[in-house]
Amino acid sequence: MIEARFRVQFPDFLLNTDLQLPERGVTALFGHSGSGKTTLLRCIAGLQRSDSGFLQVRGQVWQDSKAGLFLPTYQRPLGYVFQEASLFPHLTARKNIDYGRKRSPQAANETELAALIELLGIGHLLNKIPAQLSGGERQRVGIARALALKPQVLLMDEPLAALDLQRKQEILPFLERLHRELDIPILYVTHSPQEVTRLADHLVVLEAGQVVASGALAETLTRLDSPLAERKQASSVLEVEVCGHEPEFHLTQMQFVGGLLSLPYQQTAALGTPLRLRVYARDVSITLQKSEHTSILNILPAQIVEMAQPLAGQVMIRLSLGGVPVLAHITQKSAIQLNLQVGMQVFAQIKATAIV
């Protein structure tokens, strides 16, 4: 695990965290601007000295204020990716990658570097200078530069924030590949719910310098006391597997422990392909009986686990679909008419065209 305990007092802001984070996969640090995400990342990197702190990464103590230990940034085996790639403008992409690599005895060898270049899809960019690259291409080179040092943890501070929508869509598949194939923890700062649901395994929600929620993505995302659950973009994540196709209807079937789903056609997805789906709470409705006369294809048995009323006229409901948590936002009137109660067995209705 990564243990990160920091207390940093600024004139008008206090960061106070006590976290245990997994040593593999992507941990998203999520919150509004000013919530403390970047400050926490800078503490982990050693760029921000904390009044008191303890940091242990993969069994190595990098900071222990009580023992007077503080490793400077250059002694911490980490990679750091900023919002801007900040490449040397006069060097080619390959020379940018090699710049730090040649100064580190632990850096990737040529075989490892070749695999990294293939993973990020930048082989055709190596002889170009940054001015000849798109924003997404520059960021991929920046990620390669950070990973070429063979860090024990990769820190990413809103790496997509400076990109337009097209460039974000260009780089996201490569970030997903890193997620699947890297054997190191990635701490990923973002204020984008879309990036959280697409990339994260673990979620830390920060608010005014305090951790208000932390845990596995599916559980933390659907906690009714989390700020994410209250938003219009509130959603749940389903880990599914492709199990069939209906090309005549342009539909694909996917299964998970909660049941079978029909989705828009995923023609290139082979049987057995694992996928992650995002289901918006606003697109989940509830019925007491499974209707045979409806256009909705996805009607799954569920149990009401928790209910809350954050706003007048609205009810948030946390459902369990075979143990998988799913959020539903419905009107207060609907909840009263159906006499919904915690513990009730119901059916969750999800429109096929609403799942992304």
Image: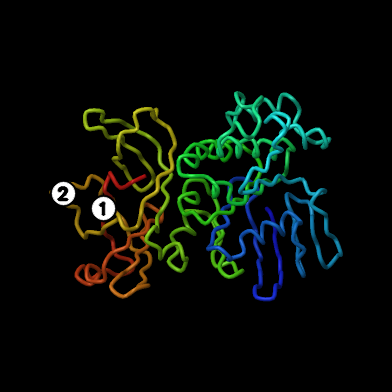
| Crowding near the residue tagged with mark 1, few <14, some 14–19, many ≥20 C-alpha atoms within 10 Å | many
In which quarter of the view is residue 13 placed?
bottom right
The label number, if any, that marks residue 288 in the structure image:
none
Residue 217: image x %, image y %? 50, 54
Q: Which residue is drawn at 57% across and 40% down?
A: 179
Position of residue 246 measured from the top left corner of the image (x, y, whole percent): 26, 30
Residue 143 drawn above or below residue 62 = above
311 or 142, nearer to the observer: 142
Q: Which residue is drawn at 73% across and 54% down?
A: 45
Counting from the top left corner in percent of width and height, residue 325 is at 41, 56
| Image location (x, y in percent) of residue 234 | 40, 59
User: Label 1's element?
Assistant: strand
Pointer 1 residue = 349
For badge 2, the amino acid type reads: Thr
Residue depicted at x 67% and y 61%: 39
Q: What label does residue 294 carry, if any? A: 2
Task: Judge whether 66 appears above or below 138 on screen.
Answer: below
